[in-house]
Image: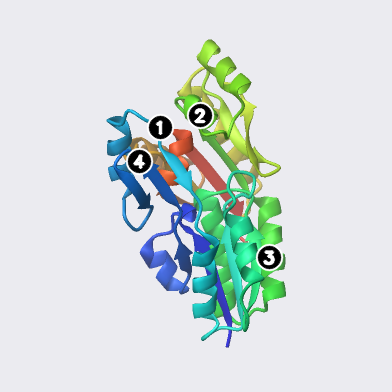
Amino acid sequence: MGIAVVTDSTAYLSEEERERYNIRMIPLSVNLEDGSYEEEVEITSSEFYDKVRTSKSFPKTTQPAVGKFVELFEELSNEYDEVISIHLSSGISGTYQGAAQAGQMVDGIKVYTFDSEISCAPQGYFALKAGEMAEQGATSDQILATLEEMKRLMHAYFVVDDLAHLQRGGRLSAAAALVGGLLQVKPILCFDEKVIVPFEKIRTKKKALRRVEDLLAEDAMKGDKFIATVIHANCEEEGREWMNQLAETYPNVEFNLSYFGPVIGTHLGEGSLGLGWVKKI
């Protein structure tokens, strides 16, 4: 019967990308002054940033209920023997744990949960690769082994305008946020051991982005083929300009443009930029 692939909304895959491999998406929610919205379903990224700009309170995020996963897995059991459920880092959300719990509650289908240990477009890389391999007839063991190898080769860095969002959302320590604010630095952040940590402290955004490019160059100059994504928080023009500059410099890298949607945007804040990449395997 085959293998189904599930991911959550924070991969920010387009509808076209999901349909290509029949990837099912389960949304996280963002709670604003005027109510709760399922991202990618009930609110767009631009609508979210517009609302936050005029809001008096800080938005909060909510992971999917375990019951939502149970419903989806039971539905998939009618067509599939197995499902690989790929989610944002368990260090910043309980979504992965919810999927794992639901997988133990359903009969008739074997559920494999995969902790991407990251989020956004790099998380989407895992889902797209799993979908491609499932379509080609790979086994779940083969797919999971490939995803683990991708995880080893994955890199992602991001630069935020204001550390207060991460600190208020509990995704960065108050001390790290305070230091960043006092020094007026634009820290480069990354995922390490499943959580968001400062990588380097840089004085300006321009220099921070240049440093991220240097990190990409360390891999790209080896001559292998890579896929990379520039990710923006409601600053598409700036993100596209950076992507075009990078594409001119690194012809062996396939560049795409994506975005930090409402849930991740809650923690990073408007104006953030990121770059994720992985060697093609």
Which amino acid is tagged 1?
Phe
Q: Which residue is drawn at 52% across and 66% down?
A: 67
Where residue 157 appears, x then y in whole percent?
57, 38
- The residue carrying mark 3 is 146
Which quadrant, please, contains the C terminus?
A: bottom right
Where residue 264 appears, x then y in whole percent?
47, 43
Q: How crowded is mark 4: few (under 14 residues within 10 Å), some or many (20 or more)?
A: some
Q: Which residue is drawn at 58% across and 47% down?
A: 93
- The residue carrying mark 4 is 32
As drawn, 199 above or below 184: below
Q: Tell me the mark number nearer the camera, choosing from 3 and 2.
A: 2
- CB-based contact (under 8 Å), mark 4 and mark 2: no
- CB-based contact (under 8 Å), mark 2 and mark 1: yes
Q: Can residue 134 be seen in this view?
A: yes
- The residue carrying mark 1 is 58
Q: How far apart are marks 3 and 4 (CA)?
A: 38 Å
Q: Tell me the mark number nearer the camera, choosing from 3 and 4.
A: 4
**Among numbered discs 1 and 4, the one appearing first in the sequence:** 4
Q: Is mark 1 on a helix, strand or loop?
A: loop
